Amino acid sequence: MIPDLVANQIPELVPELGQLALTIALAFAICLSLIPLIGVHSPQQSSLKRLVGYAKPLTYGMFIFTGISLVILGYSFVIDDFSVKYIASHSNSHLPYYFKISAVWGGHEGSLLLWVFSLTAWTAAVAKFSNGIEEEFITRVLAVMGMIGVGFIAFTLLTSNPFERLWPNVPMEGRDLNPLLQDVGLIIHPPLLYLGYVGFAVAFAFAVAALMAGKMDAAWARWSRPWTVGAWMFLTLGIALGSWWAYYELGWGGWWFWDPVENASFMPWLIGTALIHSLAVTEKRGTFRNWTILLAIFAFGLSLLGTFLVRSGVITSVHSFAADPSRGIFILMLLAIAMGGALTLYAFRANTVASFSRFAFYSRETALLLCNVILVIATVTVLLGTLYPLLVDALGYGKISVGPPYFNAVFVPIMSILFIIMGIGPLIRWKKAKQGELRKQIFKPSVLSLAFGLLFPIVYGGEFNALVAMGMILASWVFLVVLREVVNQYKIQGKLTLSHLGMAVAHAGIAVTIVGVTVVSMYESETNIKMSVNDKVLVSGYDIEFKGIKNVEGPNYSAQQGQVNVYQDGEFITLLKPERRAYRVQTMGMTEAAIDPGLFRDVYVALGDPLPDGAWAIRVHYKPFVRWIWLGAIFMSIGGILSMLDKRYRRKKTSKAAENVVADSLTSSVAANNTKVTEA
């Protein structure tokens, strides 16, 4: 009798099981933060030394129970448990099951749980794939990750509990997911973005562990680098997917608006890019250690700042979560503790972080240093443009907005300088380059880039355009220089390492993105027209014919669907079906654009308002090369994956002296062979 009664109550207690699992994960995080560190700092002969061995089991426990909590929340969404406040606010029984799954992270509470799960997943991955790292060092890394876990799991339980009940006033139906979020892109976008955001916590933990141990050598940089590249790769994909979603879902035809939330993810990406290159120098030459430590700290700090901007309610954005400002205070406290603690530790250890390798001004180290400085300056300009309106408002000077004109005027020239130096870096040798050597290396790429860039606007657009020419010169410069460097390395070594190939693919991806941004910004067209049934209009070489409207029904919406034929040179291309949707529960209208995609152009049609006499307002965009923006991001991510797979990141630890000897030997060999290639 009693077992049957308990069994009947189990389905009703499922959310409580999720909260219990998250509470247990908090207990594991607290233990991970304390117990292994006691073992690390115990005398060698002490019985407490064995506590070091508890780090990995505690890590796995934290990950497993956080995962259980997330799965239970997803299950509660699928079975429509509207007694849970979060589910009642973000789901509906008519919502398709795949959107119910994405609704798990469709609001503040659930997305924060996904954030926490991403953190524990990264921590478990570090524990699993760290066999080549010193046990005491990786124990410190895991302990720091545990401390971060304590802060965010406590934040979730205390201020943002996704399992909070509505008893006894349980609604019969949910309020539905925000129609903006009912899209396939939103199923993938937040997990990728969070894996990038949170992944920088690993670089932060490695930096703090190195400071704690007083061991900032080449081995530490080699251990940290693949994790940093992994976080950067996920963030690249997340930002690109968010841009693509905004392009086709919001109906305005743009791919980037310098929205504060867009900036919140872009700033860690910029600093993360600098960090990857700084780690490469620390690994190969043993220098830039101050840069590397600080960049690792600030990359994660900017990730926390982005979390604050999205969740505090201080900004209004289509990307942000409506949240209680008191939650923002909690995040600011976490940010202050993490950054303050790390920077204080750095201040005490700064005298031990001095670089041991000298280099001349005319060297690859200098080029990479300049790139890092420029990336930091670019980040500061974005940060200033994002926070300045908030500061002005907080000081009582009124509300102002800083939009695309500021960012385009300041950011674009800075990045243009970066691309020029980025092309020089791979071709100049480490430590000190010979006079005249670089000039011979860059002569052909320079001439070809200038020729291509100057001719492109004349051939493609029919007239010279200085901005287009500049963009195409930079794109071809980056591509040709990296191609030259790949050819050089292949002639020298007869093969390319995965890390080297990954660098080349990532830099080529940047060139592809530059082409996409340049061409679509300068040659796109937008036409707003009034069309009746069977009207036809010519737009950018395409005949657009309006064939009328159909009424269609979706699972939780009704829509008016336009029927638009697209012709080119009298030949039928495709039928586009833009929609205006009305969602039943939230009574919110949405515009769903229809796109005919292509590698070299998109034809983009959005349905506007109905007009008198049965006519409709229709907006047609012609977007040349727009897909190259996201194609470049894919190439960058592939480059990141190739770099992570390089076999040297799976080697056992070597001594610092041995690593320096190997680095110097390789540098001398490459330099000598580069000279031979140049002379040939």
Image (spheres, rainbow, N blue to C red):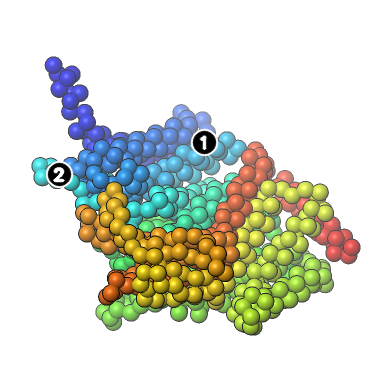
Q: Residue at x 22, y 40 (%)?
A: 81
Q: Are marks 1 and 2 in contact (CB under 8 Å)?
A: no
Q: Residues within 10 Å of mark 1 (few under 14, many from 20)?
A: few
SS for callout 2: loop
Find disc 1 in the rendering and name its residue. Answer: 128
Task: Report the disc number at residue 172.
Answer: 2
Image quarter for residue 610?
A: bottom left
Q: Position of residue 114 (x, y in %)?
A: 37, 46
Figure check: 367 above or below 156: below
Q: Amino acid at mark 1?
A: Lys
Q: Position of residue 174 (x, y in %)?
A: 20, 48
In the depicted view, which residue is nearer to us: 365 or 452?
Answer: 452
Judged left or right of residue 19, residue 527 is right
Query: For residue 338, which quarter of the picture?
Result: bottom left
Of 508 and 582, nearer the camera is 582
Q: Residue furthest left?
A: 168
Please report the residue visible at 53 percent of the width from the left and 42 percent of the height from the top.
137
Nearer the observer: mark 1 or 2; the answer is: 2
Calculate the distance from the C-alpha at mark 1 to the C-alpha at mark 2. 45 Å
Name the residue at the right extreme: 680
| Residue 69 x %, y % | 32, 38
Residue 129 seen in the current view: yes
State the residue at coordinates (42%, 42%): 120
Q: Residue at x 31, y 67 (%)?
A: 316
Image side of residue 247 versus residue 358, left or right: left
Pick the front one: 244 or 258:
244
In the image, residue 77 sits, relative to residue 600, either above or below, namely above
